[in-house]
């Protein structure tokens, strides 16, 4: 029994010594406070709006036909270069020529009738002036003459209409350009009863394209004509294309409850890499300042924490709302500054600093090497999970 008591006492002493060692060691762990610094430098600051858009020709014309018929000849295909007035297609003219011949025959008949009625009217007029016929006969001759005149006018209009329709059967290019699309083939019948059939789409100049970009309503207020734009297309991922905002359209477009506005961007295409229909990833630079003094924006949010100062360190503040901090020996000094443009990452400094100044951006905690080698720390005063009783 005495031996057991001595063993218990020895175990208790060892445990007390171990706890004391843990507490002593835990109390010696130190956390060093370090500060990230930044150098005042000259750089560019930009703010931008991003969107997607579609590459389109600046001018494109849809060519159709105002008359119905069978496509007799096609003289162009996709990518054909055409000139203004060049014949690009013809419809079958058989029916149209028959309509023109019929209209001319009716005009000839009307003209013959007019000649007769005119002679008859002049004869009746002479007889009426001599009192040889009644007024009723004279007025009837005059009426027949006037009706003949109107019939000639109507027949003339029918001839002009038939001539015009015959001309519509020969389809010409309205502009100089290139054929982007072709919607018909030879032998196909086109009907112009209710709308104008589309035969071709011709783009005027593919060396000058444009991007139609959809800008979110939250960003459209920052977009102005003349702002610089850069964009990329998936077809040429290594190329960055440049342009300018040429138009901000006022009509809103709503898709799935999302409101956007269309912005037109110039897209020079001298090397012909841009093709109609490509999707463009657009960046519009809404504000730009070049070669100005800049600092990280987070430096304006830094302030020294008195609890983390050493006994030797002090704080020298100022009354300015805009300020940055420098570390001069053991003194944290506040420097009043005047800021300009900011993009959230960098901020322009108009006064208070110069190139090369070192400022504090943030502080961070670092444990010493001994504390780091111990891994996770445990608190001996925290409650421990219950243990099973192994006494028998």
Image (spheres, rainbow, N blue to C red):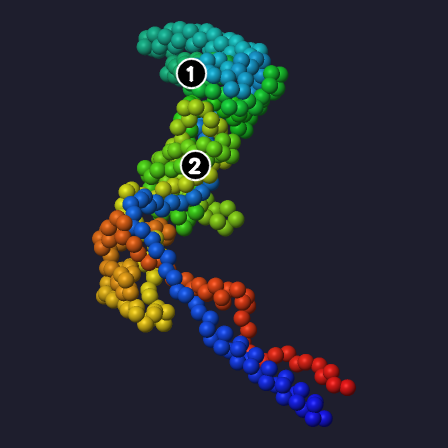
- Of label 1 and label 2, which has the lower sequence position? 1
Residue 8 or residue 388, whichever sits in front: 8
Residue sticking out furthest to the front:
3
303 lies above or below 106: below
Q: Please tell me whether mark 2 sits on a helix, a strand or a loop.
A: strand
Which structural element holds mark 1? Answer: loop
User: In the figure, 289 relative to 374: above or below?
Assistant: above
- Residue 84: which numbered mark, if any? 1
Please indicate whether residue 335 sits to the left or right of residue 264 in the image.
Answer: left
Residue at figure coordinates x 43%, y 34% from the top left: 240
Residue 321 vs residue 185: left or right?
A: left
| Mark 1 or 2: the one toward you | 2
- For mark 2, what is the residue? 231
Q: Return the residue nearer the eye: 53 or 70.
A: 53
Q: Residue furthest bottom?
A: 1
Q: Residue 136: where, in percent of width, then height?
A: 40, 17
* CA distance for labels 1 and 2: 33 Å
Above-or-below relation of 107 to 293: above
**Residue under the point 41% across and 41% down:** 283
Image quadrant where one finds the C terminus = bottom right
């Amino acid at each position: 029994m005495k031996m057991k008591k001595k063993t218990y006492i020895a175990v208790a002493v060892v445990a007390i010594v171990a706890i004391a060692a843990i507490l002593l060691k835990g109390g010696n762990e130190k956390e060093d406070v370090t500060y990230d610094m930044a150098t005042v430098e000259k750089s560019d600051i930009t703010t931008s709006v991003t969107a997607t858009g579609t590459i389109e020709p600046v001018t494109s014309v849809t060519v159709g036909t105002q008359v119905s018929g069978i496509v007799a000849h096609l003289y162009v295909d996709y990518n054909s270069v055409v000139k203004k007035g060049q014949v690009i297609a013809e419809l079958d003219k058989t029916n149209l020529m028959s309509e023109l011949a019929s209209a001319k025959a009716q005009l000839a008949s009307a003209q013959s009738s007019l000649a007769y009625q005119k002679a008859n009217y002049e004869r009746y007029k002479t007889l009426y002036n001599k009192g040889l016929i009644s007024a009723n006969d004279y007025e009837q001759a005059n009426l027949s003459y006037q009706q003949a005149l109107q019939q000639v006018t109507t027949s003339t209009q029918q001839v002009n209409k038939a001539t015009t329709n015959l001309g519509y059967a020969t389809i010409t290019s309205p502009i100089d350009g290139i054929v982007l699309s072709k919607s018909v083939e030879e032998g196909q019948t086109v009907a112009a009863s209710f709308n104008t059939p589309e035969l071709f789409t011709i783009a005027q100049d593919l060396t000058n394209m444009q991007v139609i970009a959809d800008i979110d309503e939250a960003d459209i207020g920052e977009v102005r004509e003349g702002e610089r734009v850069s964009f990329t297309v998936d077809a040429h991922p290594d190329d960055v294309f440049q342009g300018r905002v040429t138009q901000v359209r006022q009509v809103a477009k709503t898709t799935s409850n999302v409101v956007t506005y269309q912005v037109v961007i110039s897209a020079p295409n001298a090397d012909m890499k841009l093709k109609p229909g490509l999707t463009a990833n657009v960046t519009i630079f809404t504000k730009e300042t070049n070669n100005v003094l800049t600092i990280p924006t987070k430096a304006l949010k830094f302030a020294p924490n008195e609890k983390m100062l050493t006994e030797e360190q002090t704080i020298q503040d100022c009354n300015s709302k805009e300020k940055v901090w420098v570390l001069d020996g053991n003194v944290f000094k506040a420097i009043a500054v005047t800021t300009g443009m900011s993009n959230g990452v960098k901020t322009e400094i108009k006064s208070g600093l110069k190139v090369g100044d070192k400022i504090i951006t943030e502080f961070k905690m670092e444990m010493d090497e001994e504390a780091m080698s111990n891994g996770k720390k445990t608190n001996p005063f925290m409650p421990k999970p219950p243990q099973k009783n192994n006494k028998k």
